[in-house]
Amino acid sequence: MHTEIRQKNGSKKYYLAHSFRAGTKVRKVSVYLGSNLTPQELEVKRSAAKSQLEDKIRAAQTISDPILPHCHPPNVKS
C-alpha cells in the first residue's frame, strides 16, 4: 500500500492505493483520503482507510461466476 498524490486545479488530492497482479493484468484499487491534508491529518486518515482498502482488495481478488448475474433466481441451484 502506498499514498498517491494527484494534483488537480491547484489542490493536492491524497489516495491510499494498492496494485496487484491478476493473471496477466495489473489491477489497482484506491481509497480517497482527502485534499490539501497536513501530514498529521494524512496519517490519521491513512490508518482509518487501511481496513476499507483491504476490503476492496479482497473483493477485487475474488473470482466471480460470469453466468450467475444473468440467471433468473429460481433457476440458480446452490
Image: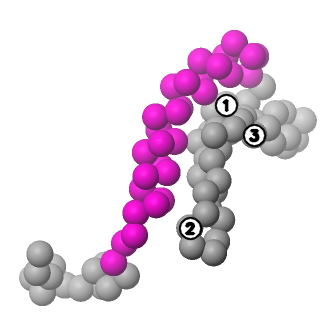
Q: Secondary structure at mark 1?
A: strand
Name the foreground residue: 7 vs 54: 54
* Mark 3 nearby-residue class (10 Å; few <14, some 14–19, many ≥20): some
* Residue tagged 2: 22
> What x and y, as percent, mark residue 49?
53, 32
Q: Give the quarter of the image for residue 69.
A: bottom left
Name the foreground residue: 38 vs 59: 59
Q: Residue at x 81, y 33 (%)?
A: 12
Q: Residue at x 75, y 16 (%)?
A: 39
* Mark 1 nearby-residue class (10 Å; few <14, some 14–19, many ≥20): some
Q: Give the quarter of the image for residue 22.
A: bottom right
* Residue tagged 3: 4
- The amino acid on which the numbered mark 1 sits, given as a three-letter code, is Gly
Q: Secondary structure at mark 3?
A: strand
Figure coloring: one colour
* Residue tagged 1: 34
Q: Secondary structure at mark 2?
A: strand
